[in-house]
Image (cartoon, rainbow, N blue to C red):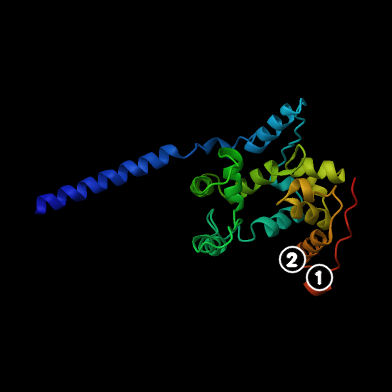
Amino acid sequence: MAARTFLAAGLSAAMASLAAVAYLLWLPDASALKTQNPTTTTYTALYARRMARRGKKAGTAMRWVPLAGISPHLVKAVLIAEDDRFWRHRGIDWYELNPILLANLRGEEPQRGASTISQQVARNLFLSPKRSYGRKGREMLIARHLERTLGKERLLEIYLNIVEWGEGIFGAEAAAQAYFERAAADLTPEQAVSLAAALPSPYDRNPSVEPDERLLKLRRVYLERLRLKEGGLPAAAAAPPPPVQPL
């Protein structure tokens, strides 16, 4: 009996080891991203194919700048809009994700969201944007791997340089130049909030589109929270941002 127990334990340990090795081999090699900046993403490739189907050449604007070269207003506004607990989670924000998972399990109307910046980088660089539970699981595993490999600041730098902000516009520098004709380092709080509010739907909400009341309200909320984070006016006293005029 003891021999059988020992054999079973040995087999279990061997299977666990094989599973761990398979998992490590399955993960993408992200070590090069420590020093090398990505030049393409899933979304730049999709944009290029979309333009090709129209018989046009994709004029992709993606100008890389270091994190220090991006306005702190934009960095904070994007975190407010996309991942307010970025510095506290480890790639997956279970606090935000658990209610969505429970709602889906209960058969309620499908819920989306709660993708952290780390997950968005994983999706942009290594996965398809097609939604499925399988892709979401892979996205979460890769996000955790990227956090361990690259660290928070590098992940945030990558995200701000590859995220889509409109037709052929990728990254903070390209967006700042396209919409405000200034460097990403020089964005005002109002401009930063306008860009941050566009991220869930960059084609419909970018600063060149006339904002509706819902978008104006969202910008006001983000601006109030940004001012609180920066130690400025209290939320109740914060003036709403002026509407962004289409270029």
Q: Secondary structure at mark 2?
A: helix
Label 1 packing within 10 angstroms: few (<14), some (14-19), many (20+): some
Q: Secondary structure at mark 1?
A: loop
- Which residue is more in the foreground, 175 or 211? 211
* Whole-percent x, y for residue 185 in the image: 79, 47
Residue found at the very far bottom of the displayed protein: 236
Q: Quadrant of residue 176?
A: top right
Residue, disc 2: 225
* Whole-percent x, y for residue 18 in the image: 32, 41
Q: Residue drawn 59% across and 42% down?
A: 130
Q: Amino acid at mark 1?
A: Leu
* Whole-percent x, y for residue 224 in the image: 78, 66
**Mark 2 or mark 1, which is nearer the start of the sequence?**
2
Q: Is residue 163 left or right of residue 101?
A: right
Label 2 packing within 10 angstroms: few (<14), some (14-19), many (20+): many
Q: Is residue 243 left or right of residue 96?
A: right
Classify the position of the N terminus by image quarter: bottom left
Q: Amino acid at mark 2?
A: Arg
